[in-house]
Amino acid sequence: MRPSYFGLTVFLHLACLSIPATSQSSIDPFVGTFSGSGLTLTLTGQSGQYSGSALFEGQTLPVSAQKGGPGLISGFYVLQGESLPFQARLQGNTLTLMAAGEVYSLTRQADGLSKGGAETGQSDQVNNDEWGLRFTVPAGWRARLTESGYVLGSKTVRGILLLLPNEASSLEEIRSGAQEGITEAGGTQLRLAGELKPFGLNGLAANYAGTLQGEKARAYAIGLLSPHGVGAIVMVAVEPQSYTSEHTKAAESLARSIHFFKPPISPIALEWKQKLNGCRLSYFSRYSSGSSGGYTSETTIDLCVQGFFRYGLNDETVWNAGSGTMTGGYTMKYGKGSGTWRVIAQNGAPILQLNYYDGKVAAYTLSSNEKGRTYLDGDRYLRTCDANDQVVEARPNCW
């Protein structure tokens, strides 16, 4: 579930990047948007696994790829239901893409995830269709998209700047959440340090003080409503002695630049994506025919937050026979490969789509019952999302 204003559990995980640091984390060079020669390619992902889309001659084509060597990726794009291969080589900000016998020269676009604008003093604009917002990265800062939201860091301003999604539906809900502050195990307690003040026509802002991960901290936060559903939280934090007007200025600049729009992604698809992100789906089946034998089968689908999935199948089949006939059995274990995953909506129904790297595409209709149990094509799947689950077999394999 997305955080509602200052109920920022996810903030604590992001804050572990260290408040005093400049947050200059390395960014995968293939992540971002590249455009040229009539083609625009957008890729997301990490650890050498990528997914995204290619816009070509008015068509949006799904893309999946993986790293093939230094500066090289290879993968597939889907055109009219057919998976076609491509390769791309990156040199600096130029991506040379080869597909269907053609060569395209693409240039990295300023999207807030690149190494460009923030270091040169320019401002980059970031568009997030999933949340339904776009914003401009403040000059001198760099933005990085994480599992929970955007983390911004600066080489000249200490501290960390965050942009997170917010599900508050009214200013009263924002006010209530803001007054609660943040109290979590591990030495985190941030409380209001002053009154809440209006921010524009759709938000509230406030100063906070206390401790973060056991260290003294000062923060300034702004909560914004969206007319289309998912709003935003902007927060800047640093140790108290380092807080200056530059921190307030950066947070307010980021908040004022935010423009909300109706997400092109179906709300039901978004809801299911959040529900499945980082989880393992397990399906168990058994068959027994008495004295003649039977089988057991376990299917697992690990849906990783990085955008890739792992599919596993463990079958054990046993035959039994009477006197004078052959008896025996075998166990068959193998992996079905991996690829990228996403949730889409078709005719109002949520669909889990698995795009294998060999070009195969599998699709499952998602549903749940009143108890919250998860079904794929009507079959019950156990959903487990704790990477430290005491039952090892229940842990998502996303490493």
Image (cartoon, helix red, strand yellow):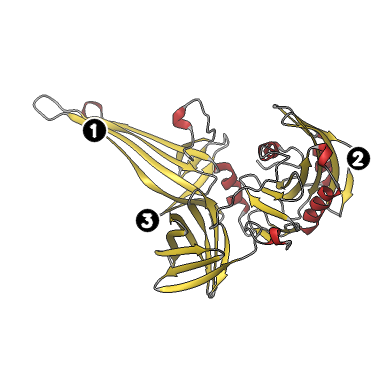
Outermost residue toward the left in this view? 324
Question: Callout 1: 10 Å neighbours few (<14), some, many (20+)?
Answer: few
Q: Nearer the viewer, residue 211 or 22?
A: 22
Question: Callout 3: 10 Å neighbours few (<14), some, many (20+)?
Answer: some
- In the image, residue 137 lies at what x, y percent? 72, 57
In this rendering, the answer to whether 26 lies above or below 327 is below
Label 3 to label 2: alpha-carbon separation: 57 Å
- In the image, residue 34 lies at what x, y percent? 56, 66
Relative horizontal placement of residue 371, taking residue 237 as reference (left or right): left
Label 2 to label 1: alpha-carbon separation: 70 Å
Residue lying at 86% horizontally and 48% vertically, measured from the top left: 245
| Secondary element at tag 2 | loop
**Residue 350 visible in the snapshot:** no
Question: Callout 2: 10 Å neighbours few (<14), some, many (20+)?
Answer: few
Looking at the rendered image, the quarter that the N terminus falls into is top right
Q: Return the mark for residue 330.
A: 1
- In the image, residue 186 lies at what x, y percent? 70, 27
